[in-house]
Amino acid sequence: MSVLLSIVMPAYNEEECIEVVVGNWMALLDQHFQPQGETRLVVVNDGSKDRTGLILDGIKDRYPRLVVVHQLNGGHGNAVVHAYRKAVELDSEYVFQTDSDDQFVPQDLLRLWEKRKESDFILGYRQVRHDAPFRLFVTKVLQASLFAIYGTFISDSNIPFRLIKGDFLKKLLAQLPHPVPFAPNIFLAVMAKKSGQNLLDLPITHKERATGEVSIKKMKLLKVCWQSFKELAQFRLELNDKIRAIKRPQPTVSQPARID
């Protein structure tokens, strides 16, 4: 059975807020997406060292639409891709990705949902971003890097608040580099933009982080930014072939002749 919408999120060491976050997203589904069989919330526990996994397992019976996936720690990007692939396995018509740190407002999904017929790949945009100044600086550097490497501007290319048509996501995932890059959402956004999608960049609310702590601090952030820059530069050499593959029409499946 196909699913109208799958919400996917990675989770790592979010024991202080994961139950609240799941409850908030479930409340949105209950209010705006019925019947229950048409939606799922897929949470990928990325080898959390705290009680995140235990809490998720403990609330599964409370929420029939909750799908919990446990994996060894592979990093945020790896968990995001794992969640996307799980949504594709569920034959989801639409896939929405967000994070589990309680910095986004579930109601803002409806802004993207209203525009779903206008694009196969829609991004939110944090007009006011509640992050440390250093992270904001890195975002500006990323914007400049994407423009320099790809000649394109994307307001918030790595934002974990995006709505993607399921069949389009399947095409994008097939063209994602191997091994999975540190920030796969950037690559997906670039491929979507270059393939002709209007990303829309709809303004959404970003809240200050109230629990837990950011896992990537200054020096590590600099290191992974350099890693991402090198991955993006290398990917530029492959981009044209990737875009042609994405634009290639899906083969039609012929139906057997009917004999009356």
Image (cartoon, grey):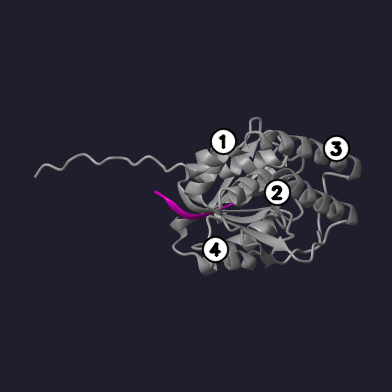
Q: Residue 180 location in percent, x, y?
A: 66, 34
Circle nearer the viewer, 3 or 2: 2
Q: How many marks?
A: 4
Residue at the top extreme, as displayed:
179
**Mark 1 or mark 4, which is nearer the start of the sequence?**
4
Q: Is residue 117 left or right of residue 184?
A: left
Q: Secondary structure at mark 4?
A: helix
Q: Secondary structure at mark 2?
A: loop
Q: CA distance from mark 1 to mark 2?
A: 17 Å
* Marks 1 and 2 in Cβ contact (< 8 Å): no
**Mark 2 or mark 4, which is nearer the start of the sequence?**
4
Q: Which numbered disc covers residue 223?
A: 3
* Marks 4 and 2 in Cβ contact (< 8 Å): no
**Mark 4 or mark 3, which is nearer the start of the sequence?**
4
Circle nearer the viewer, 4 or 2: 2
Quadrant in which the C terminus appears = top left
Q: Secondary structure at mark 1?
A: helix
Q: CA distance from mark 1 to mark 3?
A: 29 Å
Residue corresponding to mark 1: 241
Residue corresponding to mark 2: 151
Q: CA distance from mark 3 to mark 2?
A: 24 Å
Residue corresponding to mark 4: 29
Instruction: Please state the extent of the stretch shown in magenta in the rendering.
Output: 1-7
Q: Residue 15 location in percent, x, y?
A: 75, 50
Camera-nearest residue between 136 and 27: 136
**Mark 2 or mark 1, which is nearer the start of the sequence?**
2
Residue for point 88% across, 45% down: 217
Residue for point 51% across, 38% down: 245
Residue 69 appearing in the image: no
**Mark 3 or mark 1, which is nearer the start of the sequence?**
3
**Mark 2 or mark 3, which is nearer the start of the sequence?**
2
